[in-house]
Image (cartoon, rainbow, N blue to C red):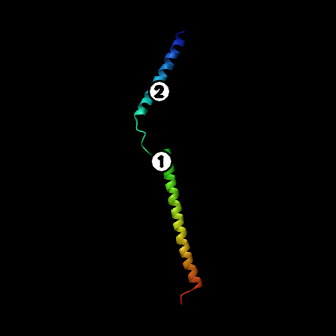
Amino acid sequence: MASKEEAPVASTSKPQANQLPQEGKKNKKKNWRKPYSPSFRIPKIQKDAMENVFNMARTLMEFKDKEEQRMRQLHFPKK
């Protein structure tokens, strides 16, 4: 019976040990934001996507202008 009495004592000491770190976590600040954390991820990804679209559009416009100049020179060469 001595072993049965020791088992509850051991089980009650574990939850107390587990409660100590939880109390420490409550005191920590939760407002910090890390890049690509769940609170930061969506706006950052959206911003990156918008920058990529803008850069592609700018590149296409530059390519279109260069292509138009090349076609003008082919069809209407300067004399």
**Placement of 45 over or under 69, stated as above or below:** above
Question: Looking at numbered disc 2 in the image, what kind of residue is underneath it?
Answer: Asn
Residue 29, x across and y down, in percent: 40, 38
**Which residue is the site of mark 2?**
18
The quadrant the C terminus occupies is bottom right
Q: Nearer the viewer, mark 2 or mark 1?
A: 1
Distance between the alpha carbons at the discs numbered 2 and 1: 30 Å
User: Which mark identifies residue 40?
Assistant: 1
Viewer-proximal residue among 24 and 43: 43
Q: Residue at x 53, y 61 (%)?
A: 53
Indicate whether 17 appears above or below 60.
above
**Lower position in the chain sequence, tag 2 or tag 1:** 2
Up the image or down, 77 lies above or below 34; here it is below
Q: Give SS at disc 2.
A: helix
Mark linked to residue 74: none
Residue 3 at what x, y percent from top left?
A: 53, 12
Residue placed most toward the observer, 24 or 65: 65
Type of the residue with mark 1: Phe
Furthest residue to the bottom?
79
Q: Are marks 2 and 1 in contact (CB under 8 Å)?
A: no
Quarter that holds the N terminus: top right
What residue is drawn where x is 45% and y is 30%? 22
Return the residue found at the far right.
75
Dot 1: element: helix
| Relative vertical location of residue 21 with respect to residue 46 in this rendering, above or below | above
- The single residue placed furthest to the top in the displayed view is 1
At x 56%, y 76%, the residue is: 67
